[in-house]
Amino acid sequence: MAQHTTHLGEKIKGVREMLGVKQDALAIELGDDWNQRKVSMLEAKAEIEPALLEKVAAALKVPKEMIENFDRAEVVNICSNTFTQSTLNGINYYPTFNPIEKIIEIYKEREVLFERMLKDKDEMIARLESLLNGK
């Protein structure tokens, strides 16, 4: 059975990366005495003081427990079991309708509309001719 790491620095890095936050951005959120290098050093530490962990959690806008319990393998497992190739990025590669039939349907609707427009045009011409002949 795999043993879960208790390396808090790695867990902070995992949560930060999952949220798409760069080290520079986290440093800005942590305050003036922080920079990218200091965040990198923090992520290299196995143990982190509870007060600092609380501050990092607040900067990342997550509960402290999320960092403490973070498991990259579990996140990957959940994602791989949740998303399939056919629904990745919200694109359904296996539609429930036949695209060719849908295109034909659209063209038929346009054909009906075009025929109605031609009929309206012919009626308008007939009315205009009757007005001109009436004078």
Image: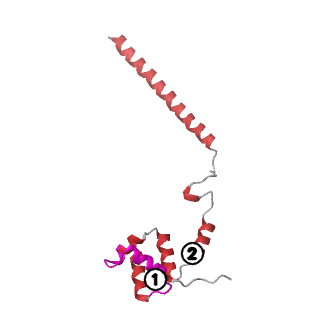
The foreground one among 39 and 62 is 39
Q: What residue do we see at 58% from left, 59% from top?
A: 88
Q: Amino acid type of disc 1? A: Lys
The residue at which mark 2 appears reads as: 72
Q: Amino acid type of disc 2? A: Arg
Q: Is residue 61 visible?
A: no
Indicate yes or no whether the magenta region holds residue 43. yes
Q: Is residue 131 visible?
A: yes
Q: Secondary structure at mark 2?
A: helix
Residue range corresponding to the magenta coloring: 28-48
Q: Quadrant of residue 100?
A: top right
Residue contact at pointers 1 and 2, CB within 8 angstroms? no
The image shows a total of numbered marks equal to: 2
For discs 1 and 2, the disc positioned in front in the rendered view: 2
- At label 1, counting other C-alpha atoms closer than 10 Å, the crowd grade (few under 14, some 14-19, many 20 or more) is some
Q: Secondary structure at mark 1?
A: helix
